[in-house]
Image (tube, rainbow, N blue to C red):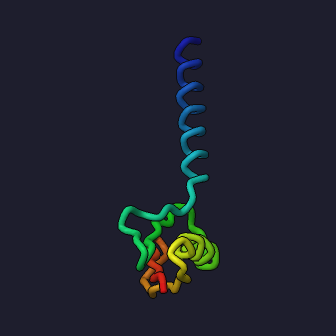
Amino acid sequence: MNQLTKFIQEKLILAAVLILLHGCAAVFTDASDANHVTFLNSADESLSQLTDKANAYCQQYGKRAVYRKGDNLLVAVFDCR
């Protein structure tokens, strides 16, 4: 019975970690500055959602975000103009 309890606890912890990781949003990287913002899109957010977040970032510099074309949205780069 002790092994069954340990097994269940391990599975619950794993499930909790997976739920937390799934809830992670796109995060701008340390490479971002006043001229561009780079997102690591771990949550499969749409280009529209990323654009909104990039605009919020660029607004602090009085600029608007313009998407820089890329092969995928895993790493999304926006120019602040």
Determine whether 51 is above or below 39 in the image.
below
Name the residue at 59% across, 26% down.
Answer: 8
- Residue 13 drawn at (x, y percent): 56, 32
Q: Nearer the viewer, residue 65 or 14?
A: 65
- Residue 80 drawn at (x, y percent): 47, 81
Determine whether 13 is above or below 76 in the image.
above
The quadrant of the image that shows the N terminus is top right
Name the residue at 58% across, 78% down.
Answer: 51
Q: How many marks?
A: 0
Quarter of the rendering containing residue 20 = top right
Determine whether 9 is above or below 74 in the image.
above
- Residue 42 drawn at (x, y percent): 51, 61
Q: Residue furthest front?
A: 62
Q: Nearer the viewer, residue 26 or 1?
A: 26
Q: Residue furthest top?
A: 2
Name the residue at 44% across, 77% down.
Answer: 77
Quarter of the rendering containing residue 11 = top right
Q: Nearer the viewer, residue 54 or 41?
A: 54
Quarter of the rendering containing residue 50 = bottom right
Q: Nearer the viewer, residue 35 or 15?
A: 35
Name the residue at 53% across, 63% down.
Answer: 26
Q: Is residue 27 left or right of residue 31?
A: right
